[in-house]
Amino acid sequence: MADSQVSTRQLVLDFVTFLVVAAVASPVLALVQEWTGVDGEILRFTTFATTVGAIAVWLRWPGSRRIVSVTRTDALSAFGSSVVLALVLMLVLFLLSLIEDARWSLLDPSTLPAPLVVVLGLQVLVERRG
């Protein structure tokens, strides 16, 4: 097997490792959040559970697979797929909103536990890291 190929067994093992570590990390991070007293409406530590799982998988990879080269075609393909998926999701949500005929109320920034810019900044940080 060439260095760039990964066996099915290895992929399954990586997937199981990710799931187990992320599943264990979630309640542990919830306890850490409770212990530190960080407001869950601003930042939920449990959103980092998938990051912990990904780090665990990355750490167990052999050295030859630590850095993966990505071609321009691969990057454009991933980007294009993401855009298509986002458009499909937006269409589904739009159709569901027409069917349900219920509208979300506008966000009242005065009801947030922190300034809106802090909440949005942390959400972006968590989404990029998680």
Image (cartoon, rainbow, N blue to C red):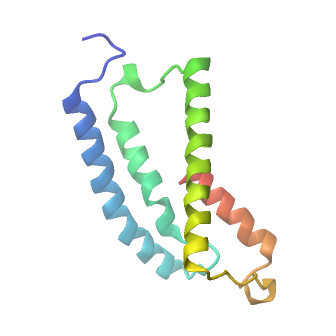
Residue 46 shown left or right of residue 25 in the figure = right
Residue 92 shown left or right of residue 26 in the figure = right
Q: Position of residue 57 (x, y in %)?
A: 35, 41
Q: Position of residue 66 (x, y in %)?
A: 43, 27
> Residue at position x 27%, y 34% from top?
11
Q: Residue furthest front?
A: 99
Q: Residue furthest left?
A: 9
Residue 70 shown left or right of residue 14 in the figure = right
> Residue at position x 31%, y 63% from top?
24
Q: Quarter-wise, where is residue 108 in the image?
A: bottom right
> Residue at position x 59%, y 41% from top?
84
Q: Quarter-wise, where is residue 111 in the image?
A: bottom right
Position above or below: 64 against 44: above
Give the number of callouts: 0
Position above or below: 111 against 75: below
Residue in front for this viewpoint, 43 or 84: 84
Q: Residue furthest bottom?
A: 111
Quick check: can you spot residue 40? no
> Residue at position x 37%, y 45% from top?
56
Residue in front for this viewpoint, 36 or 130: 130
Image quadrant in which the N terminus is located:
top left
Quick check: can you spot residue 116? yes
Q: Position of residue 88 (x, y in %)?
A: 56, 50
